[in-house]
Image (cartoon, rainbow, N blue to C red):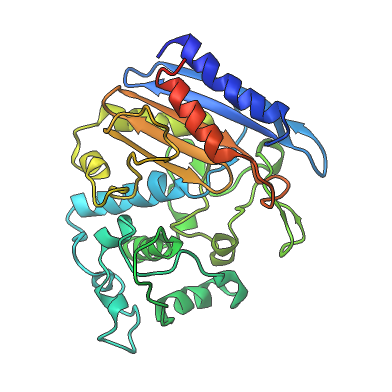
Amino acid sequence: MSAAGFDRAFAALEQSVSAGRIPGGVLGYVDRNGARMTRAIGRAAIVPEERPISADTWFDLASLTKVIFTTTRILGHAQAGEIDLDAPLTSVIPDFRQYDPNCWERQVTFRQCLGHLTAFPAVEPIYTYDGDPDRLRAFVLQREWKRLESPVYSDINFILLGIALERLAGKTIREMDPGPGFAFSGDPQHTAATEHCFWRGRVISGEVHDENCYALQGSGHAGLFGTVDAVLGFAGDLLQRAEAPDVTLMRTPLSERRTHGWERPYGGWHGGARASDETIGHTGFTGTSLCIDFDRGHAWTLLTNRVHPSRHFDSGIMALRRAVSDFINGAE
């Protein structure tokens, strides 16, 4: 990609910041040879006090956790022969819905969860049921879940995969190594602020924005923090290992829109109209996104704090993601 293409992509981010749609953001690019470009603009926080953003700012990566952390580790366990992706979750979590041995939940497989091909609802306010993280895990495992008629993108899939990782490792997610450059919290003075949380009664900075992950004290669907360099390092590694068994699965379609853990190109997706068919990507609710184009041999990430100080505002983040992606891929 030319520097001019990166400049045009950054100009789209700059326009969103100047228009007051988002407080700030960082754009990053890496190719399969390791060449990088990064640039930041705007503010890491507006309230309770202003702080500038930089390429060193940490971000709550939100649902990028699903692909950077959870998918990577589930596929690693599968490659090591420690799980069978087509086996039910009960092969690792035998007590899942243990009081109804014939229920549909006990038939759900790892592969179905990775591809969001289950009947679980999109989300559930788990944090409202209890304050104890171990009891909340028991609630997730024993709840009689509403069965949807058609699969949807569901946090429940990855909350369950996170519990499976905990069972396999014999420790909580927050006790695990999140990978080079990543953490499960951030220094509040060096982390982009997210929302003023009415439940917690404060502006969130350095602790996870997602209420369910916060209440569970670590989960497979959210909770990872990192800088633009950490995200680019992860993406660059996948580009260099494009034909490795785990990366091949990440690229293997499971449905029209999804692979193992990731999204794939479809009309109107966040990766724009110019990404190759060999592109995978994902977004995060806080305003983050990552796309990896294996055909062109490059990846790009847009990290913003679009929910600061409130999610209840039209930030235009999807249009921005698509515009950035198209400029990265050669739009004039």
Quick check: 130 left or right of 200?
left
Taking depth in this image into account, of 287 and 327 the one nearest to the observer is 327
> Looking at the picture, does residue 88 appear above or below residue 25?
below
| Residue 56 figure quarter | top right
- Residue 66: x, y in percent? 41, 51
- Residue 54: x, y in percent? 65, 26
Taking depth in this image into account, of 196 and 55 the one nearest to the observer is 196
> Looking at the picture, does residue 240 appear above or below residue 4?
below
Q: Residue at (46%, 56%) from the top-left corner?
A: 221
Q: Residue at (68%, 29%) from the top-left corner?
A: 17
> Looking at the picture, does residue 158 appear above or below residue 231?
below
| Residue 193 figure quarter | top right
Taking depth in this image into account, of 118 and 31 the one nearest to the observer is 118
- Residue 157: x, y in percent? 38, 63
Answer whether residue 234 is visible to the viewer in this image.
Answer: no
Quick check: 58 left or right of 247?
right
Q: Residue at (24%, 31%) from the top-left corner?
A: 242
> Looking at the picture, does residue 66 appear above or below residue 4?
below
Q: How many marks?
A: 0
Q: Residue pushed farthest bottom?
A: 99
Q: Residue at (31%, 63%) from the top-left corner?
A: 168
Answer whether residue 314 is visible to the viewer in this image.
Answer: yes
Q: Quadrant of the N terminus?
A: top left
Q: Residue pushed farthest front?
A: 267
- Residue 45: x, y in percent? 74, 38
Taking depth in this image into account, of 212 and 137 the one nearest to the observer is 212
